[in-house]
Image (spheres, helix red, strand yellow):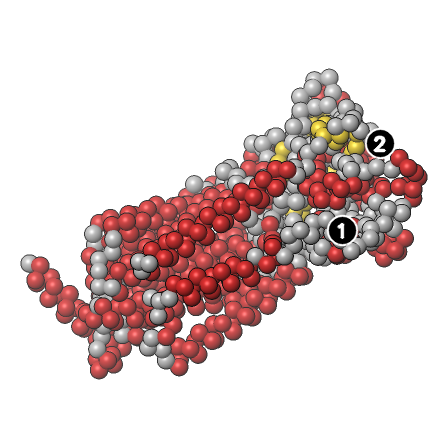
């Protein structure tokens, strides 16, 4: 089946995109080799800030991977039929996301030759060990389930019972990958920004906002590029999930502020002060946090009122803002913020280096390449087997009109309405 | 299209090629390697005719890496720094402070054989080669 | 001959392959059983210092900045600790830290400068409930039977989880190849490689043969070392007779380094 992605209905621009990504991967790999020969001195990490951007990105992409469950769970557990067409999108999004998360761990390991010591000397009291157990398991589950579902569809069959069983197993795994990743930090006694029981809940909430936001953006992109239509009702349902999850996340961020500043305990305030306002002259993250706050305000405004959320253009913006804001909060600043106050009561700074940047770009390129191939596979299979999900070529122009709600999803809105009438 | 005979023949050829390193060396166990290692160090010479390693030479030649790997665990993790052989000799289990006391000629002993057998043990990334005139001037 | 179906043929082929590999595994395990390394017994040195909770009492009344520099020199020279000039990448086992920094968050607010800026000895606290050991995914860092927290450099993968976890900033990562920054080499002790974490080991290699840690020896009586579980030991007596401080005891790590102020 995979050959469909590679050879069927390819265009020059597709190959140009793939080659571009491969070039980025090559650059990232070269940067990684440089890091391995020179040592981690070429990164911005130090004796004080011992984890940096790599572990931050690990955290963020574990969240993206876990976020896919917000389609899988309603569909398999609550029989939300609208998600039927895009469950495979959720499952296939988790694959590149987990692979990226794992790669971010690998590039962060000082002695990768000894990496498998994690399994050889399995250590149940270590959270990092559990992370390295649940992440590959979740990856495998999504590969098997996503591929089997799509293969069944390709053959014109319904997927088998064991596939559904595995999909149900993948649900607790989706939660566990992010809970374990949160435990990695929230169990450290001397890092006050990490040391909060709120952390796993905050991580999950933000994941359930970030993952679905990315799925909506991908659906919009698939529609624009390939004419694949996820169904407006599915998108509407997802947007409600995002609105609740994102509001909950921001609420919890607010709670962190209250606890730190009302209690007025210095080491509880330190990380927030450092990130949002600057502390002891260290303020390199303040611009990022200003962008974060602006994103939050606009995203909430676009998500909470129903008429905003149900406008495709505004929803698209809202999803982009949600993704960007959580990328800043979780991917870029969370780890550095937590480690910024050293055990000696001083603030240590961190400056990302070009080497780190190129390695991160390389891993992004790997993830996007895998996503490109997987989603192309989805589109090709769906075009053969689910013509209803497809906007006819001559009407593609109409579909691209992002001006109004009806302009973009005119055909699906109409069809969904027909279906509702039929059901009645 | 589907011809089992051809597939089986191809499989046999494939297996034959893949297992070449195994069957090509059958019967050549007794051939001693074409490499000469030196036991000419001050410490070994001082022992004279009584010179013997912690275990006998053939055993050490084949198993020194296993011995060292076991020491590594016993010393670092279990804190057992002494090894008492079956015939009652006591040694400090230490590469630097026991092995190299006698085998102070890294280049003519360790390295020669490692190069011959094309192995690059990661031990040397941390464990220092014994002090010799050549590496002292180089390292210090 | 009855024609085999493709599926049957593939199944047969897989079975054959499985059989061959099983035989190979069997043969190799027989071979390795015949050549196990052990032909002797391992023992501890009889002179080994006794104790189940090795700890340290540092009398700061008798130690000044110069003394600390001397202790560091002795320790780092013996253990081949590199002298990395770039502060971001530095490696240290024992070093000087100002009182206000060493006891950050636990000092008085309007402390006179001469006390606040006084250099204290900082090193690994060899906690009884060490966070680093709890978080290490490979058991590369572990507590030995004497309560000394050790590093197994062979096993460390360099994930730096222990560094994020340590409340005392006791751990250093080899950001560079340490061999490039050795002022002089001690051939009796190994170096480390780049990409692993290291820290003070309470001179476990000396304790094992009945010697005191190097810093204890070099401090000329200002630092004492011994079993905190033994009420008759020198460290226990010093703690019983003097006003002492431990770092960050509110975190539950139970550090075993005591300071006499």
Q: Tell me where residue C39 sits by quadrant.
A: top right
For residue C123, say whether it is visible.
no
Residue at the outermost front position? C1
Q: Is residue A378 left or right of residue C39?
A: left
Q: Is there a contact, CB below 8 Å, between mark 1 and mark 2?
A: no
**Number of the front mark, 1 or 2:** 1
Residue at 33 percent across and 55 percent down: it is: C8
Q: Tell me where residue B76 sits by quadrant.
A: top right
For residue A55, say whether it is visible.
yes
Q: Which mark is residue A66?
A: none
Percent from the top left, x then y, of residue C75? 79, 41
Residue at 65 percent across and 28 percent down: it is: C145
Residue at 47 percent across and 68 percent down: it is: A365
Mark 1 and mark 2: span between their CA atoms? 57 Å
Percent from the top left, x then y, of residue C154? 66, 45
Of the 4 image quadrants, the one containing the C terminus of chain B is: bottom right
As drawn, A278 above or below A231: above
- Please give the residue where the numbered disc 1 appears in the rendered image: B32
Q: Which mark is residue C220?
A: 2
Q: Is residue A196 left or right of residue A241?
A: right
Q: Disc 1 sits on a residue from what chain?
A: B
Q: Is residue A403 left or right of residue A260?
A: left
Q: Looking at the picture, tell me which residue is in the foreground, C21 or A126.
A: C21
Q: Looking at the picture, tell me which residue is in the foreground, A71 or A383.
A: A383
Percent from the top left, x then y, of residue A270? 54, 48
Q: Disc 2 sits on a residue from what chain?
A: C
Secondary structure of the residue carrying tag 1 is loop
């Amino acid at each position: 089946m995979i050959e469909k992605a590679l050879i069927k209905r390819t265009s020059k621009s597709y190959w140009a995109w793939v080659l571009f990504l491969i070039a980025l991967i090559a650059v990232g790999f070269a940067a990684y080799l440089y890091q391995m020969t020179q040592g981690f001195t070429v990164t911005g990490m130090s004796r004080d800030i011992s984890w940096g951007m790599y572990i931050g990105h690990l955290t963020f992409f574990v969240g993206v991977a876990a976020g896919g469950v917000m389609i899988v769970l309603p569909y398999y557990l609550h029989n939300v039929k609208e998600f039927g067409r895009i469950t495979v999108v959720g499952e296939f999004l988790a694959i590149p996301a987990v692979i990226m998360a794992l790669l971010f761990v690998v590039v962060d390991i000082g002695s990768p030759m000894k990496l498998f010591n994690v399994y050889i000397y399995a250590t149940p009291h270590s959270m990092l060990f559990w992370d390295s157990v649940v992440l590959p398991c979740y990856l495998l589950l999504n590969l098997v389930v996503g591929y089997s579902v799509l293969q069944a569809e390709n053959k014109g069959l319904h997927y088998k019972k064991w596939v559904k069983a595995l999909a149900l197993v993948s649900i607790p795994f989706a939660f566990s990958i992010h809970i374990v990743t949160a435990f990695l930090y929230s169990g450290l006694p001397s890092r006050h920004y990490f040391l909060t029981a709120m952390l796993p809940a905050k991580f999950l909430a933000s994941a359930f906002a970030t993952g679905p936001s990315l799925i909506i953006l991908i659906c919009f992109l698939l529609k624009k590029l390939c004419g694949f239509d996820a169904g407006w009702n599915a998108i509407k349902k997802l947007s409600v999930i995002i609105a609740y999850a994102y509001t909950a996340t921001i609420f919890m961020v607010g709670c962190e502020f209250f606890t730190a500043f009302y209690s007025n305990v210095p080491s509880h305030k330190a990380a927030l002060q450092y990130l949002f306002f600057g502390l002891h002259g260290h303020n390199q993250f303040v611009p990022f946090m200003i962008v974060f706050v602006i994103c939050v305000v606009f995203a909430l405004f676009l998500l909470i009122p129903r008429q905003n959320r149900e406008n495709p253009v505004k929803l698209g913006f809202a999803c982009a803002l949600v993704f960007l804001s959580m990328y800043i909060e979780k991917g870029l600043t969370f780890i550095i913020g937590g480690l910024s106050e050293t055990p000696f009561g001083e603030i240590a700074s961190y400056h990302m280096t070009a080497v780190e940047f190129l390695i991160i770009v390389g891993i992004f390129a790997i993830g996007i390449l895998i996503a490109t191939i997987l989603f192309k596979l989805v589109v090709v299979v769906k075009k053969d087997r689910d013509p209803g999900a497809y906007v006819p070529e001559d009407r593609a122009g109409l579909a691209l009109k992002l001006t109004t709600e009806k302009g973009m999803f005119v055909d699906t809105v109409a069809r969904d309405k027909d279906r509702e009438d039929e059901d009645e | 299209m589907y011809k089992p005979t051809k597939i089986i023949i191809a499989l046999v050829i494939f297996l034959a090629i893949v297992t070449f390193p195994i069957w090509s060396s059958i019967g050549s166990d007794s051939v001693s390697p074409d490499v000469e290692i030196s036991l000419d160090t001050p410490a070994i010479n001082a022992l004279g005719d009584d010179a013997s390693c912690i275990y006998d030479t053939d055993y050490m030649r084949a198993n020194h890496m296993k011995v060292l790997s076991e020491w590594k665990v016993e010393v670092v993790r279990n804190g057992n720094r002494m090894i008492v052989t079956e015939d009652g000799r006591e040694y400090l289990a230490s590469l630097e402070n026991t092995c190299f006391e006698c085998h102070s000629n890294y280049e003519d002993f360790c390295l020669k054989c490692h190069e011959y057998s094309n192995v690059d043990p990661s031990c040397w990334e941390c464990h220092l080669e014994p002090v010799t005139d050549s590496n002292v001037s180089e390292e210090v | 001959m009855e024609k085999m179906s493709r599926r049957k043929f593939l199944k047969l082929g897989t079975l054959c392959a499985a059989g061959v590999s099983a035989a190979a595994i069997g043969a190799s395990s027989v071979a390795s059983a015949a050549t196990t390394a052990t032909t002797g017994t391992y023992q501890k040195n009889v002179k080994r210092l006794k104790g189940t909770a090795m700890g340290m009492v540092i009398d700061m009344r008798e130690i000044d900045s110069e003394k600390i520099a001397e202790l560091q020199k002795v320790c780092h020279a013996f253990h081949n600790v590199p002298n990395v000039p770039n502060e971001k990448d530095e490696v240290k086992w024992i070093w000087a830290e100002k009182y206000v920094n060493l006891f950050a968050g636990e000092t008085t607010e309007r402390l006179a400068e001469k006390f606040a800026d006084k250099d204290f000895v900082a090193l690994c606290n060899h906690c009884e409930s060490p966070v680093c050991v709890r978080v290490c995914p490979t058991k590369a860092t572990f507590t030995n039977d004497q309560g000394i927290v050790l590093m197994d450099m062979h096993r460390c993968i360099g994930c730096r989880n222990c560094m994020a976890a340590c409340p005392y900033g006791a751990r250093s990562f080899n950001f560079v190849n340490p061999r490039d920054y050795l002022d002089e080499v001690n051939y009796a002790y190994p170096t480390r490689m780049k990409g692993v974490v290291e820290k003070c080991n309470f001179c476990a290699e000396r304790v094992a043969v009945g010697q005191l840690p190097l810093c204890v020896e070099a401090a000329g009586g200002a630092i004492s070392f011994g079993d905190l579980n033994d009420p008759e030991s020198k460290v226990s007596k010093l703690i019983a007779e003097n006003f002492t401080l431990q770092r960050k005891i509110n975190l539950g790590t139970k550090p075993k380094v005591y300071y006499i102020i």
